[in-house]
Amino acid sequence: MNGKEFIKSLDFIVAEKNILKEKVLEAMELALLTAYKRMYGKTNGEVEINGETGEIKIYSVKTVVEKIEEEAYEDEETEESETEEKVIIEPILLEEAKKIDPTIKVGEVIKEEVTPKDFGRVATSTAKQVLTQKIREAERESILDEYKDKQDELVVGTLSMEDAMNYYVDLGRARGVLPKKELIPGEKLVMGSSVKVYVSKIEATTKGPLILLSRSHYGFVKRLLELEIPELNDGTIMLYSVAREAGSRSKIAVYSNNSRIDPIGSCIGERGSRINNIIKELNGEKIDIVLYSKNNAEFIKNALSPATNVTILIDNDDSNEALAIVADDELSLAIGKKGQNIKLASRLTHFKIEVKSRSDASSMGINIK
């Protein structure tokens, strides 16, 4: 690869992959300098690449001195580390330096071209390596830029691979990782089928963006609701919070500032059409839709549905603790199987809720009319 071929290849890649030409040339110069130092045992130097012709020149860099000491000149400001080479400043006598540049003075730095005759082969190999590396880096950055705004969003992909721990979802230019523990319990996915997934995390790695996906995250339910219910997107209905036990039950709290709008009815849809579409996507998971209220007692009462005969006592809103007193025959409804209902109600309202039956409350001296 001669200079013209290198520049032609560089310009093509810069245009196709949208890479800055200056970055490629800078990386190329650094790589060639490293190769030169290793091949010829040099400790200092500079590489210059003509961005128009592709011509490569290597220069030795020396400090002009009157007398060369026996000890090597070492840059006192440069610290040696495990990852960086010790920088040696090579000296050159003033009389020798003047043969190169008659105007040079002691203490100044002089550059002398020392490009090896057989360095073309090294340059060709290094150019290919640098260009390949820059293409990969540019593609990784481009993919990351494309997907970085999709975190916490719903995307659709195709199941392309599977191993013991994960499914891999083809998202177009990238592949997302769907851990099997992030599936809805009990669901079966078919390889090659289309699947909706929630992007729970995007992270830059040396191999490209890591895109973690989920179908059990509570955000998955939230995005499905927004997809199915237009009023959530146009602001007619607001979604206050979502609490979920994937595969079993979700509770969602909604409200509207428009008194003529029934937020719960709008979410359910005509004959349950909207909510049934979401339940189908969630593999039969039950969904409770409750009305949010700024009145904490009222909100907690709504959240404890399907229990209806409920009285809420809150000593101090700042404590985020509440006592729910329910009819004796509704105690099991309020608590739910294995405590699920009260757990979801607590997550939904952000209150620690304790439930007591009326008879238990009465025995404790708490009388409710």
Image (cartoon, rainbow, N blue to C red):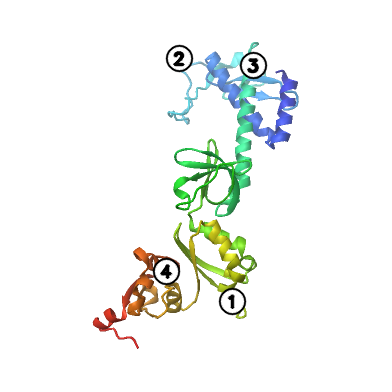
Indicate which label's residue lies in the foreground, 3 or 1.
Answer: 1
Residue neighbourhood size for the residue with mark 2, other residues' Cα within 10 Å, grouped as few (<14), some (14–19), many (≥20): few
Q: Nearer the viewer, residue 191 or 66?
A: 191
| First in residue order: circle 3 vs circle 1 | 3
- Going by the numbered disc 2, the residue's amino acid type is Glu
Indicate which label's residue lies in the foreground, 3 or 4.
Answer: 4
Residue hosting label 3: 98
Task: Using the image, tell me which numbered label, if any, was put on residue 70.
Answer: 2
Q: Are marks 3 and 4 in contact (CB under 8 Å)?
A: no
Residue 114 visible to an observer of this rendering? no
**Relative to 310, is 285 on the left or the right?**
right
Relative height, residue 266 to residue 51 (above, below): below
Residue hosting label 4: 345
Q: Residue furthest front?
A: 271
Q: Are marks 1 and 2 in contact (CB under 8 Å)?
A: no
Across and down, in percent, residue 247 comes to 46, 57
Indicate which label's residue lies in the foreground, 1 or 2.
Answer: 1
Residue neighbourhood size for the residue with mark 1, other residues' Cα within 10 Å, grouped as few (<14), some (14–19), many (≥20): some
Across and down, in percent, residue 64 comes to 57, 20
Q: Are marks 3 and 1 in contact (CB under 8 Å)?
A: no
Residue neighbourhood size for the residue with mark 3, other residues' Cα within 10 Å, grouped as few (<14), some (14–19), many (≥20): some
- Going by the numbered disc 1, the residue's amino acid type is Asp
Across and down, in percent, residue 3 comes to 72, 20
SS at badge 3: helix
SS at badge 1: loop
| First in residue order: circle 4 vs circle 1 | 1
Q: Looking at the rendering, in which quadrant would you find the N terminus?
A: top right
Relative height, residue 180 to residue 97 (above, below): below
Which residue lies at the image location 31% right of the left edge and 81% below the top edge?
Answer: 358
| First in residue order: circle 1 vs circle 2 | 2
Relative height, residue 162 to residue 199 (above, below): above
